[in-house]
Amino acid sequence: MRNIFLFLCCLVFFLSCEDKNKQSESGSTPYNPALLVEVTEFMPDAGRIREKVIIKGHNFGTDKSQVKVYFVDELTERAATVIGVDNNTIYCLTPRQLDGENKIKIVVHGKDATAESKFKYTVAENVSTIAGSAANTATEDGTLAEAKFNYLQGIGALGNESMLVFQKTDPCVRYVSIPDNAVITVHSGFAGGKPAVTKDKTKVYAAGWDSPHTIYRYTKASGWAPERIGQLGITFGKIRAVALDKNEELLYFCDAAGKFGYYEIATQKVVTLNASTDAITSDGNYLIYNWRDDHFYVSCAAKYGIYRINPDGRDVETYAGFNGGVVRDGYVGEECAFAQPDGLTLNEDGDIYVCEGFKAHVIRKISIIDNYVSTVAGYYDGANDGSQIDGSPIDARFNYPYDIDNDGEGNYWIVEGWGNAVRKYAVE
């Protein structure tokens, strides 16, 4: 009897150990702070945005909230979406990255590990037409297919594939939404240029192109209805764009005569910081604020270049171009050239994108990594045959792209002057 009892005890102990081993093998073992976090492999080794990637290794634990995955390119770390984890496996979706080979780094409970091999990311790009065309010039609301536009010169991206566009001919402001399949006029009789959109995309500010340069605010809460909040006055030339400062308290501008200043939103105070920046053109300049270096960038079509100006207006630098009216790729301060730099925008990394209108009809990019200016979409066409062609960036054709805005979601929204259309340049 005693031997039988000992046998049963041993059997229970053995089965208990076997069950624990099965649990460990299934990945239900929690994170152990006494052990290293290791990455042994991942699959696939290449892909695009939202690619499903499986990372294998040890000591990942089971708490998804304590696991982070980063794809590291030459500029920054970009967080992936972690969708599942067990002790030996992480399941994630790749973020948007720079084209090329990037590292994979994981962080588990504050401990990090990096895979030995690299993930090859391939950027997917496409140009499409959202609404409007050169063949149908008018001001008519309706579905995206039905709506018609007139000469467009400003755009503000609102996220969720929606935007406000500013019409120069038959002046008005139109709301364009892909999810709603609608174009709606929200403000008639107002000729504004490039607006300024707050970081949370709930407010948009715009200044009138002509004197007295009335300032309007459009809010998401009001359905983007216009609210007059002040004016710049009659001492300025044409103003084609405004840009918010880093604290979103001041609206900066640079008029056609090169006067650089700001409008204080809370007090309606107007301040001229520099009365002669040399950014002189006939119908106004475009400008944006660059958070990376705390400077404003002003495109001057008449000078074929882009100025960089510090927030107090004292330091004015001829940043890029000023090499004659042609399209030529090259480095900033050296051989790069612009034919007609117009609307500007930034992406999430701080790269600058430039619309080139008359005698160019292309989109240019100034890289934050190496200061190289390249043509990223469209075909350099000095004569302009009026084409509006969708497809790959190299095959795409624009008809006077005037302004551009990035929505932070990999989309660049473009309005055309002669083309009377809203276009989309997607980079994923």
Image: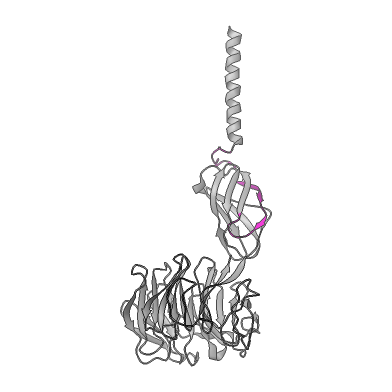
Q: Place residue 75 in its image quadrant.
A: bottom right
Quadrant including the C terminus: bottom right
Q: Where is residue 94 in the image (x, y as percent from the top left)?
A: 58, 57
Res 76 → quadrant: bottom right
167 sits to left or right of 111: left
Q: In x, y percent, where is residue 263?
A: 37, 82
Residue pictured at 51% horizontal, 46% vertical: 64
**Residue 372 seen in this snapshot:** no
Q: Residue at x 61, y 52 (%)?
A: 53
On the question of residue 260 being in view, the answer is: yes
Q: Main secondary structure of the magenta part?
A: loop
Vertically, is 58 above or below 330?
A: above
Above or below — where is 296 with respect to 212? above
Closer to us: 365 or 400:
400
Compared to residue 37, the image places residue 387 above or below, namely below
Compared across the picture, whether 72 is left or right of 197 comes to right
- Image location (x, y in percent) of residue 408: 50, 67
Q: Is residue 106 above or below residue 121?
A: above
Q: In front: 281, or 138?
A: 138
Q: Residue at x 69, y 54 (%)?
A: 117
**x, y percentage for residue 234?**
35, 92
Q: Where, quadrant-wise, is the N terminus in this rendering?
A: top right
| Range drawn in magenta | 27-51
